[in-house]
Amino acid sequence: MEPILDIKNLDVKFALRTGTVTAIDNLSLSLAKGERLGIVGESGAGKSVMGFSIINLIRKPGYIANGSIYFRGEEISRYSEEEIRAIRGNRISTIFQDPMMALNPVLTIGTQMTEAILAHMDMTQEEAERIALEKLAKVHIPAPEKRLNQYPHEFSGGMRQRIIIAISLLTDPDLIIADEPTTALDVTIQAEIMDLLIELCESEGMSLILITHDLGVVSEVTERIAVMYAGRVIETGPTEAIIKNPQHPYTQGLLKALPESRTPGEPLYQIPGMMPTLTDIPPGCAFNPRCPMRGEICITKRPEAAFADEHTGHMAACHLVSGDLAS
Amino acid sequence: MNTPTSTPILSLKNVVKHFDISGGLLEKLHFTDGRLGLQSTIVQAVNGVDFDILEGETLSVVGESGCGKSTLARCVVGLHKPNSGEIYFRGERIDHLNPKAMMPYRARMQMVFQDPYSSLNPRMTVQKTLEEPLKFHNPGIRNGEIKDRIDEVMEQVGVDPLWALRYPHEFSGGQRQRVSIARALMVDPAFIVADEPISALDVSVQAQILNLLMETQAKRGLSYMFISHDLSVVRHISNRVAVMYLGKLCELTDSESLYNTPRHPYTKALLSAIPQLGVKKSHIRLKGEVPSPINLPTGCIFHGRCPYADERCIREIPEVRDCGTGIVACHRVEEGSL
Amino acid sequence: MKQSLENFKDSYLFYSFKRDKIAMISFAILLVLVVVSFSAPLIAPYNPYDAETIDILNSELPPAWMDGGSTQFLMGTDQQGRDLLSTMIYGMRLSVLIGLGAVVLQAFIGISVGLIAGYIGGWLDNFLMRLADIQLSFATMMVAILISAIFQTVFGSSRYNELAVPLLVVVIGIAEWPQYARTVRASVLGEKGKEYVEAARVVGLSSTRIMFRHILPNTMSSVLVISTVQVANAIMSEAALSFLGLGMPVNRPSLGSLINAGFEYIFSGAWWITLFPGIFLVLLVLVINLLGDWLRDVLNPKLYKG
């Protein structure tokens, strides 16, 4: 099947006063229609930059240095601001961590929703309002007619995030990019939002890119995961395969470090060292200084993504997986 | 995890903390029934909490935002004065003491904070940050002794003592949290309140800080009051867990029983909401939303969202009762129907 | 010392200074003006305070490049026969001195009030801030006119002439402290809620120590920013007062009183007595304000451009 989103060899760089750093390094990913993909990584791994680069929202001094992004078969990475605006907020919607940041506090929910529709579609105010109501009902907001005339501060945090999701649905997008959508929320509300995202993707046939640091959340919501480290995708594959049978030593370490993996009270597994800053990414495999299985080749040669399981598409960029390094 | 003794290090007796947020006189003016009167807006953050923390144990307090867990923590270390109720440290009442009388207890109880970016003074080097509490509680201490102590504590928390002259912005989040823990350890406390100490950190760093906390506890025989919303972390490090909702205790029991056989309907909902690796499970849906702590519901504070609530729950406030493994405040559990 | 110099060279402050041409030029001009005015006795060709060097026959000579000008007096002379250039250099010294002095006083009152109001809060905060509001509703001019009028009637004008500098410092200082108090209070309110302050309280430190050792250093960047604006304002206030005859006396003129003195002669053709001090005043205030703008952009983290 034709992928809805296909990123090929993407490089994103930032020109800082201390020199140019590479925030996204040779990243390739593809996403099928209706698929839910999780981007996992720790802070500084480049996962948010990746999300922004898809919709051309990287701020200066950042820029796409190389590679291409195909959305529904069209190359959009070189689009002008005007061309991308027809896609952003229309065919691709975004949901951010803090719902209060994305809502204008002095406008009613109704105004904000109808404005978003009228910006992309040619229709009357009444039609736009009807769509707004329909979408509010879809995200299970009780009494939507009443809610349209309320202001953002009249809603709780969970409700606001539902409204953001309703807004992102207004134009029936093909893809939703959600950047840590549940991090600012309580667990019970997080659970509701996760259920909602799954339900919507299934009923509307939308694709979802879920960017998060929370392995529990991705494992519940997504079908496929890409693990990022130092601006590179180091492992990708079906969610279950990665959680149950991680191939890359970093993914293994990340999972082993979770409290669930040990009996209570025992010391947790610690990945030695720290994530490198973008200015001093080590040569070869970026993870090599912290890797317990490091070999000579890891320092000299950067590993290519290799299949761990060709059937499921489980790949890892590790010399152990490609067989260049004997385990 | 430590094996706790049975003597309490800290006892809370019916602690209540309310905040008046009504502001100035003009904002308090209200017309009711044609008459002008003064009306205050009170946030009822903590509403009568009782429990003991035993010597050497880790007691975690969990709950969602607004449940009063951070306020309770701040009452314990004396940052807030409770409106009523009593707090005892090793049998001595401390909640009503003046700053001077409180001083000896300040060195026995310390706190570790959530945000590693704002919990260290950006204008003070690590050395200044660490030596301040020590000098303050030990006037006349020799400089050599201070230096030795800083080196020792920094080494213990895993920060190179050679970095003592650096400023907080030169450290990563995890290292800052280590410095924050070091600051708490400088005065050699017996009891530490940790308010969400790892929730602002990355997964791999969380493991490091949790290990450090557990290690330090074993080495120094510390007791912890651990505030968190992350139930899987809580399970890992606690002896006992207290679940709070709207400023009240719902359930308090040893951590294994809480996770294996939760009794209170809210605990059940909370546990079902944690995403689990590799398991697609169904979540218990709660009705409605958390009520405002300004107007608390009648009866059981959870009745509006509880799937098992009946008429008695609306009317009558449930007492905290012993249920074998711990204590629960729920009419249904008491009646044996749950 | 060497280390901190290195640190400064690496800092964002220095980096953005090097990239900002306006800031660099402003700084250079300010440096020249300040150095020249403070080394007045060494640089100025004449001493305008020394009555013996002044010859009334030289009064109102035009600048050297004009007809009737003398090469002795580069920018001409004033109505009393003083060399205008020297008088301006000395006058600028007075202006800068009064400006700085007034700002030090403003800062002292304002920072203390802001710190206490912000940290202690409650009714004390209300009281101090209303006091600041009241102070602000009296215009600087009004306060100054009131105080100097009272002073002159009570102590006589010869005593006033002796004490003019400290008096102006006090007048301008008292009139404008609320600016500091408000700024400092706002940043104290921001800092107060941060966890490092709670940590200091858990240790048991006293309020005074927390205020001065922990919170105050963290409000310094906003204090620095308004200080530049306030210095410029204070210099302007002093000039305005002197222009109105309420400031520096004619025998020890500041830039403002020079402009005032020359103003009477502007229509009789001696425009230079007013124009040159005016240009210097504008230049001085302008470069300070431009530097203040730059500093605000750099120190305001919301505008931080990486």
Image: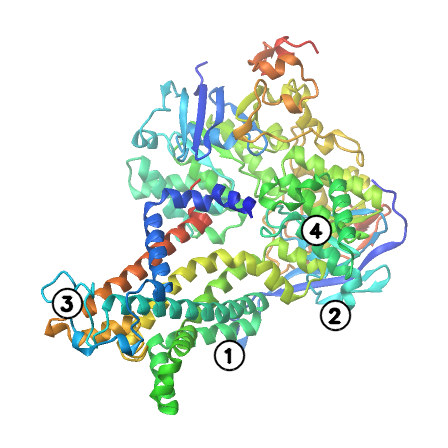
Q: Position of residue C46 (x, y in %)?
A: 28, 69
On whether disc 4 and disc 2 are found on a single subunit, the reply is: yes
Under circle 2, the secondary element is: loop
**Residue B316 in sight:** no
Image x and y of residue A222, in percent: 57, 26
Q: Residue at x 61, y 10 (%)?
A: A322
Q: Nearer the viewer, mark 4 or mark 3?
A: 3
Q: Earlier in the sequence, mark 1 or mark 2?
A: 1
Give the mark nearer the N terminus: 4 vs 2. Answer: 2
Residue situated in front as seen by the camera: B260 or A270: A270
Pick out the residue farthest to the front.
Answer: C52
Number of the front mark, 1 or 2:
2
Between C114 and A217, the one nearer to me in the picture: C114
Q: Amino acid at mark 3?
A: Pro
Q: Quadrant of the N terminus of chain B?
A: top right
Residue picked out by circle 1: B35
Observer-nearest residue: C253 or C181?
C253
Q: Nearer the viewer, mark 1 or mark 4?
A: 4
Residue C114 seen anywhere in this rendered image of the structure: yes
Disc 1: host chain? B
Percent coordinates x, y for residue C215 in the rendering: 58, 59
Provide the secondary structure element on which disc 3 rests.
loop
> Given the image, what chain letter belongs to the residue carrying mark 3?
C
Which quadrant would the C terminus of chain B be assigned to in this image? Answer: top right
Residue occupied by mark 3: C62
Q: Residue at x 62, y 42 (%)?
A: B200
Residue beneath label 2, please? Answer: B98
